[in-house]
Image (cartoon, rainbow, N blue to C red):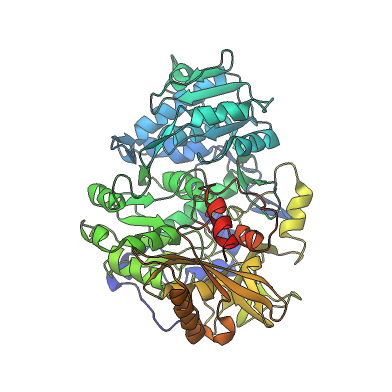
């Protein structure tokens, strides 16, 4: 985590960049004017006059205006003459493909919206969506937005219990699902999972089933219907609801430290303003030139903001891929980039480290010359992965935007603007224009140089508006520790030049012999060893040092774990960071507990090592991992 290596943007990139020098200073001088200028780029049914009303911790942005999210995603581009532009290049895991234009997407959204209205679903109703990454997913989300229904997308890997919990928390009236989906050649039994969940969801009146795999499924009379039945005989136009800027657009559930997930609320006007501005400036996006690919899942906030609402609001042409990066082969992503001439790629450090483990021969076998910008999202990216990404995917020519944000922030909050910043591998650099952050110590004092808790010091348009049904939890979780400032829950270090280095969750910051040490620093040191593909570090109770370090390590290729290798890795960390940071234990494992968005759930590793009951595991991409890790840790 040093700034010894710096990568300025290519001169030709600087000349054409959407964001030019001085934008941060102008936004800081008048942040309300900055955000209002971006809000006015949207299409409003009723223009706003009031920019912000702030009654801590409740913010209202553009509250006297009204607009519709689907109109801003679709109708206005069609009206401007861009209806023939491709909105999505859809690529199914089995190899089926379809290019969908803005005209076609608008028609499909209107037919779905009319079908939902025919069922009596309308403004303020909650609709759960449990679909694979197929075109019906963005269509369903936009159809809900069109009629004023609040969508709650549930990641397609969740268990029936997790589905039921989310449906019941917000009293959803309908569930949109599919017969199944494809993942690494296997069929995910989504309808079967849904039926188990719906046995304990009394608020559900309708279950709509898209047909993806064609496998036999049970259909319950008076509740279930197919997608085709939903849209049968519906009109290709649909009058949109004029939504108040502060009307809720969607709920998205995220894990906390308790077993109960939090239903994060995002509203319409401020959220659209935030994702439109950040997508345009952070990715230097040009609608008439770029093919953009956010390789995330729509079941997470990254997909909401940077697959759907941000890109479509900016008239983007995007890739929508259903499957895994190694289905059927480990070069699937690079094949897709070459096929569609993708120019912007946005993915997670976890994926990058996986590709490192597989080797550079896979991307080297494809023409990636169309790429001009790379992005990273999910958790702090270690410098070695940054450099591998820059060299083997970006060909040494593509700026990399390392972005920090959360489900709660709605949009990117910290990132280098690619035409301005000289990138430092591993650093998210500076706040986005109009965002004000600080680093505080335990007493709430600002840390000019050094580490502490990251806070956002003033309201921003895309901020969460609360937790569904639990305002007190909202206040206590985000606003109670530092009154007047939003607590992100992440640690951050500010260097002498003002650059920001994210350190992971505050509870991922260890206290070793009185020294505050981030898990990210130790993990980066481990990954510097060429035999290590990925690592997760936690602090465990130690009677002498307060905490000691336990490292969970994934090895590359055919490398085998052994006591000798563990000792070599411990020695390397001691040499790199100091002897007091040598891991007390090294546990070799083939996988780590992660969410589908790529975040390592270190909380579960701490519970495991501490012999505690595991907390909420519903966001794990693979529920079997914890059982394997339990066996490995028992053999320590």
- Picture coordinates of residue 76, whole percent (x, y): 43, 38
In the figure, is residue 145 to the left or right of 228? right
Residue nearest the viewer, comparing 154 with 101: 154
> How many numbered discs, if any?
0
- Picture coordinates of residue 411, whole percent (x, y): 54, 55
Q: Residue furthest front?
A: 635
Decide: is 68 above or below 433: above
Image point (39%, 81%), residue name: 5
In the figure, is residue 48 to the left or right of 481? left
Q: Quadrant of residue 549?
A: bottom right
Decide: is 588 above or below 85: below
Q: Quadrant of residue 394?
A: bottom left
Residue nearest the viewer, comparing 447 with 431: 447
Q: In which quarter of the image is residue 123?
A: top right
- Picture coordinates of residue 584, whole percent (x, y): 58, 76
Decide: is 357 above or below 330: below
- Picture coordinates of residue 108, whole percent (x, y): 41, 27
């Amino acid at each position: 985590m040093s700034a010894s290596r710096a990568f300025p943007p290519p001169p030709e990139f600087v000349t054409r960049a959407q964001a030019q020098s001085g934008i941060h200073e102008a936004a800081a001088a008048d942040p309300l004017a900055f955000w209002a200028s971006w809000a006015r780029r949207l299409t409003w049914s009723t223009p706003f006059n009031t920019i912000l009303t702030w009654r801590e911790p409740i913010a209202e942005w553009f509250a006297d205006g009204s607009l519709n999210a689907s109109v801003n995603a679709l109708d206005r581009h069609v009206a401007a003459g861009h209806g023939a532009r491709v909105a999505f290049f859809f690529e199914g895991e089995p190899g089926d493909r379809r290019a969908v234009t803005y005209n076609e997407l608008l028609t499909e959204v209107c037919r779905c919206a009319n079908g939902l209205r025919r069922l009596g679903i309308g403004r303020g109703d909650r609709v759960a969506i449990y679909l694979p990454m197929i075109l019906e997913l963005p269509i369903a989300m936009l159809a809900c937005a069109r009629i004023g229904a609040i969508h709650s997308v549930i990641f397609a890997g969740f268990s029936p219990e997790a589905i039921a919990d989310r449906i019941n928390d917000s009293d959803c009236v309908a569930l949109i699902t599919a017969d199944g989906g494809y993942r690494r050649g296997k069929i995910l039994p989504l309808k079967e999972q849904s039926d188990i969940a719906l046995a304990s969801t009394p608020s559900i009146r309708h279950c709509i089933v898209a047909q993806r795999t064609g496998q036999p499924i049970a259909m319950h009379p008076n509740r279930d219907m197919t997608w085709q039945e939903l849209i049968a005989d519906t009109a290709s136009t649909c009058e949109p609801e004029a939504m108040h800027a502060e009307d809720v657009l969607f709920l998205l559930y995220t894990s906390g430290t308790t077993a109960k997930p939090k239903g994060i609320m995002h509203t319409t006007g401020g959220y659209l303003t935030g994702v439109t501005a950040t997508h345009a400036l952070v990715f230097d996006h040009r609608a008439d030139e770029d093919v953009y690919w956010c390789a995330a899942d729509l079941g997470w906030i990254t997909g909401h903001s940077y697959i759907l609402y941000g890109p479509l609001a900016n008239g983007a042409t995007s890739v929508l891929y259903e499957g895994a990066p190694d289905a059927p082969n480990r070069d699937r992503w690079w094949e897709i980039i070459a096929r569609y001439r993708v120019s912007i790629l946005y993915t997670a450090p976890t994926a990058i480290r996986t590709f490192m483990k597989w080797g550079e021969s896979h991307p080297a076998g494809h023409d990636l010359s169309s790429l001009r910008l790379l992005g990273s999202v999910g958790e702090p990216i270690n410098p070695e992965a940054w450099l591998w990404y820059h060299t083997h995917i970006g060909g040494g020519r593509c700026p990399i935007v390392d972005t920090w944000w959360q489900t709660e922030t709605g949009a990117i909050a910290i990132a280098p603007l690619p035409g301005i910043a000289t990138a430092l591998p591993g650093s998210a650099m500076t706040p986005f224009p109009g965002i004000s952050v600080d680093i505080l110590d335990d007493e709430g004092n600002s840390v000019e140089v050094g580490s502490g808790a990251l806070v956002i010091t003033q309201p921003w348009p895309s901020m969460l508006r609360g937790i569904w049904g639990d305002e007190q939890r909202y206040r206590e979780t985000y606003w109670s520790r530092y009154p007047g400032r939003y607590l992100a829950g992440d640690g951050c270090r500010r260097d002498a030049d003002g650059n920001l280095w994210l350190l992971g969750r505050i509870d991922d910051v260890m206290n070793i012999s009185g020294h505050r040490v981030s898990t990210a620093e130790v993990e980066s040191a481990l990954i510097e060893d060429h035999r290590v593909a990925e690592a997760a570090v936690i602090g465990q109770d130690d009677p002498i040092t307060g905490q000691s370090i336990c490292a969970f390590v994934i090895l590359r290729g055919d490398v085998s774990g052994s006591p000798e290798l563990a000792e070599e890795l411990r020695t390397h960390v001691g040499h790199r960071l100091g002897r007091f940071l040598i891991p007390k234990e090294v546990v070799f494992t083939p996988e780590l507990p992660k969410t589908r968005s790529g975040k390592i759930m270190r909380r579960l590793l701490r519970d495991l090592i501490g012999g505690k009951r595991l907390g909420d595991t519903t966001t794990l991409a693979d529920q079997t991992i914890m059982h394997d890790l339990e066996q490995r840790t028992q053999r320590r």
